[in-house]
Amino acid sequence: MNEPNIKILLGYHKPSVLLKSEILTPIHVGRALATETSKDGQMNQEDYQWMLENMIGDDTGENISYLNHKYCELTALYWAWKNYDKLENPDYIGLMHYRRHFVLDESYMLENNKQIIQGCYVLDSYPKDYIKQIGLTDKNIKNKMSNCDVLAYQYQNLHTDLPSYMPKKLTPRTNYDWYEFLNVKDFDLAISIIKQKYPSYSDVVDEYINGNIMYGYNIFIMKKEIFFDYCQWLFDILQELNKQIDWTTKFDTLSIRVLGFISEQLYGIYVYNLRKSGKYKVEHARIDLIKDVAIQKSIYPAFKENNIPVIFSSDNNYAEYLGVCIESLIANSSPNKNYDIFILDGGISSEHKTLINSMVQNNISIRYIDVQPYINQYSKEIFYIDLHFSIATYYRFFLPEIFANFDKILYLDCDTVILEDVAKLYDENIDNYWLAATRDIEVIRSMHKAYKYNYQYFTEFLKLQDYHNYFQAGCMVLNLKTMRANNITDKLIKALKEIKTPKYVDQCIMNVVCQGKVKFIKQNWNYTWHLPFVDKEFSSFIPEPYRTDYLEAYKEPYIIHFTGMNMKPWENPSLDNAKYFWNYARKTPFYEEILYKNLTSKNTTILNMNLVRDIGNALQNRYLYYIYKILSKITFGKKRKTYKNKKSQLKFKIRQVKQFLKGK
């Protein structure tokens, strides 16, 4: 017996993780509207081109692609019905969504205790080998359909399964109740059209809408003859409904999609009727819901020649300090080099991105990368975090995968200022190494000052052969080509699972995996500035030659790394070398924001932005310390002078600052 020819359309409306095989057939729904503004925003040219290159569209031949805002994924269904020959006339045809798919093997879900909501297994993102994990291989699909005529989404019980958009005060007991939160009048209209056009469905319609078992989401696989009958029935009803609905009452994107919502109930009625008739064999399967479907796009160098890829990582809280760092990089760049800047985006706001992008010049490119698709391949529980760290610190594990088209990159922490051309660091020859970095002088100091306390961790727990060779990961030149050849990401994840609770999170893991493969460079390239502040006698605990190397870096730093908790130059402008940060901060569009943010961080006064801007323009570097000192005295205690409100307090302190400045 020949295997059945099956095609399953997967509806996409934006770039997402692509599922594609002999059977799985991605289709761009609403392609005719793709470059127009919609509920998902306006698709840029790069994303549109990706959609064109990776999937068919629903806008060829006879189609209703231009009605996608009303019909949703049904525009793909209509296209398949009217252009069946373009799919090679399959024996079976199906429909799934870009984030919802049939689960033909539930073992992965059960083993990983996946939550079930609305009858769907919920996953944060695609796990590795997703298709294999859920059993949605071509072989399994063919085996499943060889024993049935229709595969439908396994029904849900309305008494227990409620969608996130359903108001909590509603407790739907029947399919009819389901539409109370939308517009039940539209649903009543659809029911009357069915009974008028298809009177044989009258009893079935009443049974289904008054029952509590639902078939939803328009997800199915059907025999060709059933599919054609279903489409004829479905679109005949919807087209009439489209004519009779009062569209003048539909103002928001949710209400405009009413045909798509009602079609799910129509699909349920149709499948319910198939089961009830007994003419066809209907099987069920559960589906899943993927929360994060962001695509892992291929990244290529921005410049053809002299391209220096520099990678930063930041969230929105550090965006303004990242801006200062980029300003310092640009100020010390070479006009003969091109600087390809990438930011591993931990949630930077569009407003901050606009300000960062305003710094772009002819030889400067700035791009943002969503790292979540990479990190979400793994359970979040394995990524140990402590102190001030977040899961974003583990982004560095995935650099070889993210930059698959680069052989070499430079990684820098964003709490730095750059005083030398980083192209010189990038040119470091690391052909025989995995990476280049500086030794972590703090680890060396701590080992010699509290040897017994730290020995067990670094030597026995991490099993480092020589703790003097523990490197600081805030500045690294990475040989990605060699790292990929050695499956570095897999090794890092494996080591993390074994070590479980690394003290310095990803940095410790990288040291464990990369020991013996590191080229050590001068401390000037990663001067960790906090040591003189935490230990006045620090140099006596650093053996030669590391002491000399560090002291030389102190005198002539190429990159200052503002390490240490509560020791940042924006928090303590009087600290030694903080002047370098403020010199560059004044040249950025973030200057007033940095002042505003940090002047208010140590008290509860709400500053007026115009006043902050006035002060910021008046200040010179040596005055920063005094404004902090004055403003930090504002309190609400009974023993201090009180004021009518916070604004009067502020004005008084501003006068103090201006008087001080005038006196200087």
Image: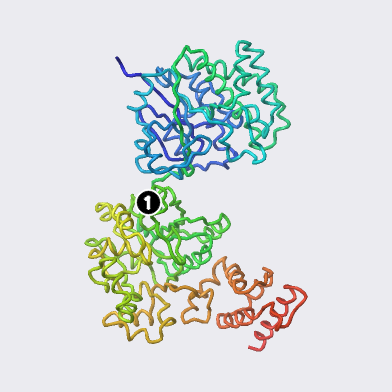
Q: Quadrant of residue 474?
A: bottom left
Disc 1 marks which amino acid? Ile
Q: Residue 641: horizontal and vertical position, in percent?
A: 73, 83
Q: Residue at x 24, y 53 (%)?
A: 486
On screen, 14 above or below 358? above
> Dot 1, crowdedness within 10 Å: few (<14), some or many (≥20)?
many
Residue found farthest to the right: 644
Q: Residue at x 50, y 17 (%)?
A: 275
Residue 528 in picture, x, y percent from top left: 39, 75
Q: Residue at x 53, y 78 (%)?
A: 573
Secondary element type, mark 1: helix
- Classify the position of the C terminus by image quarter: bottom right
Q: Read off the residue under disc 1.
A: 402
Residue occupying the far bottom of the picture: 663
Position of 260 with respect to 425 (left or right) is right
| For residue 41, above or below residue 618 | above
Residue 541, picture quadrant? bottom left
Left or right of residue 573: residue 519: left
**Toward which corner of the image does residue 264 lie, by quadrant?**
top right
Residue 476 or 328: which is nearer the viewer?
476
Image location (x, y in percent) of residue 160: 56, 35
Question: What count of labels does the image hold?
Answer: 1
* x then y, percent, for residue 280: 46, 14
Question: Is 332 left or right of 155, judged from the image as shown?
Answer: left
* Left or right relative to 236: residue 123: left
Q: In the rendered image, which quarter contains the N terminus?
A: top left
- Give the vertical position of 352 relative to 101 (above or below): below
Nearest the camera: 498 or 250? 498
The one nearer the camera, 273 or 402, is: 273
Q: Which color scheme does this rendered protein use?
A: rainbow
